[in-house]
Amino acid sequence: MPLKNSFKSKIVLGTAQFSGNYSLFQNNKKKTNIETLIKFCLENKLNKFDSAINYNNLNFYKMINTKKTILNSKFKFNPNKNVIYHIEIIKSYLNDNNILCLNNLFIHNPNIINYTNLNLLKEIIKSLKDLKLIKYFGYSLYYNPKLINFLILNFKPDTVQIPGSLLDQRLISKSYLDFFKTKNIFIQVRSVFLKGVLLINPNDIPNNLMKWKKIFYNIDKWLQINNYLKPNFLLSYILSNDQIDEIVLGFDSIDQLDEILNLDIYDNFKNPPIFTKDDNILNPSKW
């Protein structure tokens, strides 16, 4: 298992789960104190974190020694406000969390970007970089081919954060990854476990997802036929792709994190089929 001891470097720790009911998968193990979890992460050389300005997670970054960590965040672009407004939002966020500079700043609402407000966004990003408040900027994307094409061709980001999993293979297809890489764009993948839903037994699927229950049965059946352990394969499927630079993973206990870190990673496996193209199940924002 050649990736066993090396995939830590690809992990970015998500913090959305500390802002409320982000994950639909409620592990019955006791949640870990945030300070204890951060200490465990740093002791295990996991020093990359992902947050957002609108996450109500009790100044998560304030608890981290930012000199030893790589911090990413997201913010919402407001085309009705000027450059100074956006700079002050970022400055305030950095000051409140004792951060000198963000590694990546992702636009959380790229769907509102168009030809009319594109120059404003360019000005904002240039100013933030010139002021050394951010190193890189990116888009936090969902599957939207027309929008993605527009954004990449008209204001190329340093990084994209995209959904990708055994169930949602659309943006981690070879054609999309090749497209991003030919533009020299760094690729982060989130939703590897689809908010934890992919980890649970199909019989325990939340009521709001019951209409897609058969899809989850089909996934379990395919994994069983091919003798793959579910959590191992879900992680291996993303980690095995060399074009994917990092993966964003969320968890709320040391037990959960430790289980992931100790998973055996498959270095050879059969390519999975496409289980569905229904955006209503693939896009958690629609649940």
Image (tube, helix red, strand yellow):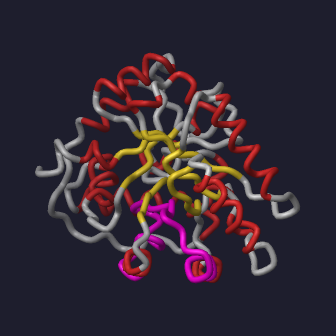
**Residue at screen point 61% across, 40% down:** 22
The part of the image, by quadrant, that contains residue 129 is: bottom right
First to last magenta residue range: 150-175
Front residue (pair 248, 186): 186
**Residue at screen point 43% across, 30% down:** 67
Residue 164 highlighted magenta (yes or no): yes
The part of the image, by quadrant, that contains residue 125 is: bottom right
**Residue at screen point 30% across, 60% down:** 237
Picture coordinates of residue 45, whole percent (x, y): 29, 32
Front residue (pair 191, 204): 191
Front residue (pair 21, 216): 21
**Residue at screen point 43% across, 69% down:** 185
Q: Is residue 31 above or below residue 48?
A: above
Picture coordinates of residue 161, whole percent (x, y): 51, 60
The part of the image, by quadrant, that contains residue 222 is: bottom left
Residue 195 in the figure: left or right of residue 236 = right
Front residue (pair 73, 272): 73
